[in-house]
Image (cartoon, helix red, strand yellow):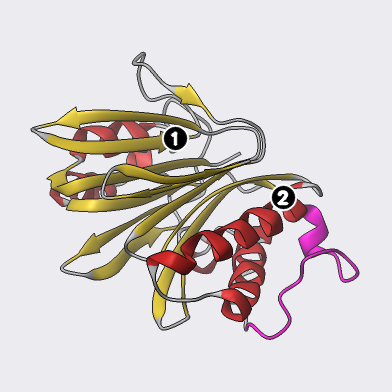
Amino acid sequence: MCELLGISSATPARVGKLLLEFGRHGGGTADNPDGWGIGFLDAGRLVVEKAPEPAARSARFGRLAESVRSGLVLAHVRKANPRTTRTLANTHPFVRDCCGRSWMFAHNGKVTTLLQPDGCCHPRVSALDGDTDSERAFCFLLEQLVLIFHEGDAQREAWLREVAALSGLIASHGRFNFLLSDGALLIEYGHDRLHVRSEGVDGSSRTVVVTELLDKGPWESFKPGELRVFHAGKELLRLT
């Protein structure tokens, strides 16, 4: 049911080893064959590359994984559930502008109420590109965020608490794990399936979050309904 990988580090670094192992989960060692995407920060700008094909058999994915050098990475391999078309529009991460900046989002889980006309948590004004519950959840969160977002560190916790509450509302109707970033923060919501590891790499701090373990190293599981926020490899906030 899809997999997520997020990386936040103090300095830009090569992350090919992690991405290549993650890519094997895209239709190779795990059944996530319906698309892949890698979003990353490059020279202050969010870049997203993706394709509706198995990452494990994609030469393009392999080349990109080896070349990415960034302090912020958000990757996804897709298992369409419920069954939707294997198209670029349905492939994560999704990117939208809100509150004067670009945001990228990827989701693991299933919230079918988002696809029902009378269901919960529908975006009201956003024009959708695809037909996934994931894109609808992203647009719903951004439409609510625009009402509460404020610039500055002093205001950050207030709007993040609202994001956590909205995420809990969506999760109450299904399964909802996600990664969200504005190019600075890496926001992670673990309904039932996130694991995190913080480590030092080449003298720099780095945090890695995944839905499925990539190795046998020391991983810490999120508590159900926990939201964590990282910046430059360091944890800024933890909400349950």
Amino acid on which disc 1 is placed: Val
Residue 87 position, x and y percent, is: 52, 64
Is 122 included in the stretch rendered in magenta?
yes
Q: CA distance from mark 2 to mark 1?
A: 19 Å
**Residue at image x 61%, y 57%?**
161
Residue 155 position, x and y percent, is: 48, 68
Rendered-image quadrant of the N terminus: top right
**Residue at image x 52%, y 48%?**
34
Q: Nearer the viewer, mark 2 or mark 1?
A: 2
Q: Is residue 42 left or right of residue 156?
A: left
Is the stretch drawn in magenta largely helix, strand or loop? loop
Q: Choose the circle earlier in sequence order: 2 or 1.
A: 2
Judging by the rendered image, the residue that carries numbered circle 1 is 210
Q: How many marks?
A: 2
Q: Secondary structure at mark 1?
A: strand
- The numbered mark at residue 168 is 2
Amino acid on which disc 2 is placed: Gly
**Residue at image x 77%, y 45%?**
174
